[in-house]
Image: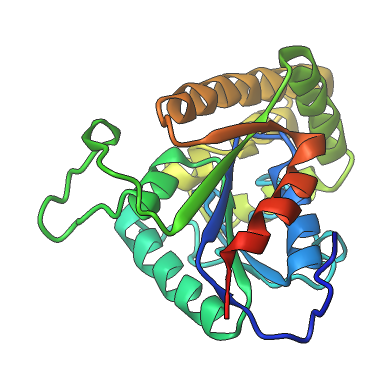
Amino acid sequence: MPDPDPTRPNNWSKILVIVGPTASGKTGAAIEIARQLGGEIISADSRAIYKGMDIGTAKPSAEEQGGIPHWGFDLVNPDERFTVADFKTYAETKIQEILARGNLPIVVGGTGLYVDALIYNYNFSEQAKKTQSDREQVEQRFYTLGIKTDRDELRERIHTRAIQMFNNKIVQETEALARHYDFRLQSMRSNIYPIVWRMIQGETTREQAINEFELDDWHLARRQITWFKRNQSIVWVPRDEIVNLVSKISRAWRQP
């Protein structure tokens, strides 16, 4: 249900976090929630932080964003360092700015360490090597929902997205990146680009490249699911139910 009075300033007592595996529909759900409640989205994706990596990291286009403010994209060049501590500082700053505007912060992503650093309030100044095994009490201001996914449906969504990427100028994007950055960089290795580059070089066919990317994305999805399943505070909800659920429970998050 849309906000009955979108012009009324809100003092939100909660920060919404939406997690789940790649291709599960997190971004689409977050955009719809933001549209209904007056929210702004903070990406928690360690691949979307890089400039020039748009198609390969599945950043929503300006049209898909639908006028909803998105933060956390294009923060650094692929050859620049950006740590989880940097993300935590950035996200906390954006959260305060969004709240000051009376809007609902919605943190969305599949990078588990980014999310954990934020909701468990990791202190990197005291212990720089904090890991996922050091989980403590979740900060009470965060409410975390996970996108519950059927295995076969997720495989099909990954397949569909792979086809879309290869039909949407991923070759041109890869060539542009290769002119400026070395494939030995972690940012270049951990994305689709090495697979596409091998196709460009004639080392593999388009069909083989698509299949390889699908398998790589499926392995990523399984790792993400394993990571998030360790967090007992996450409420898992089917994608087609999450918007209505948030519309109902968020009424209690508004402060006078």
Give the position of the C terminus as an image quadrant. bottom right
Question: Residue lying furthest left in this view?
Answer: 126
- The type of colouring in the image is rainbow
Q: Up-down: is 90 above or below 193?
A: below
> Toward which corner of the image does residue 88 lie, by quadrant?
bottom left
| Residue 254 spot, x, y in % from top left | 60, 70
Residue at position x 78%, y 13% from top? 152
- 57 or 185, which lies in front? 57
| Residue 176 spot, x, y in % from top left | 68, 56
Count of numbered circles on the image: 0
Question: Residue lying furthest top in this view?
Answer: 152
Residue at position x 73%, y 45% from top? 245
> Toward which corner of the image does residue 85 lie, by quadrant?
bottom left
Is residue 116 at least partly visible in the picture? yes
- Asked if residue 253 lies left or right of residue 79, the reply is right
- 234 or 94, which lies in front? 234
Q: Up-down: is 15 above or below 245?
A: below
Is residue 52 at least partly visible in the picture? no
Residue at position x 66%, y 35% from top? 197
| Residue 76 spot, x, y in % from top left | 48, 66
| Residue 246 spot, x, y in % from top left | 70, 51
Give the position of the N terminus as an image quadrant. bottom right
Q: Up-down: is 32 above or below 68?
A: above
Residue at position x 64%, y 20% from top? 218
- 109 or 202, which lies in front? 109
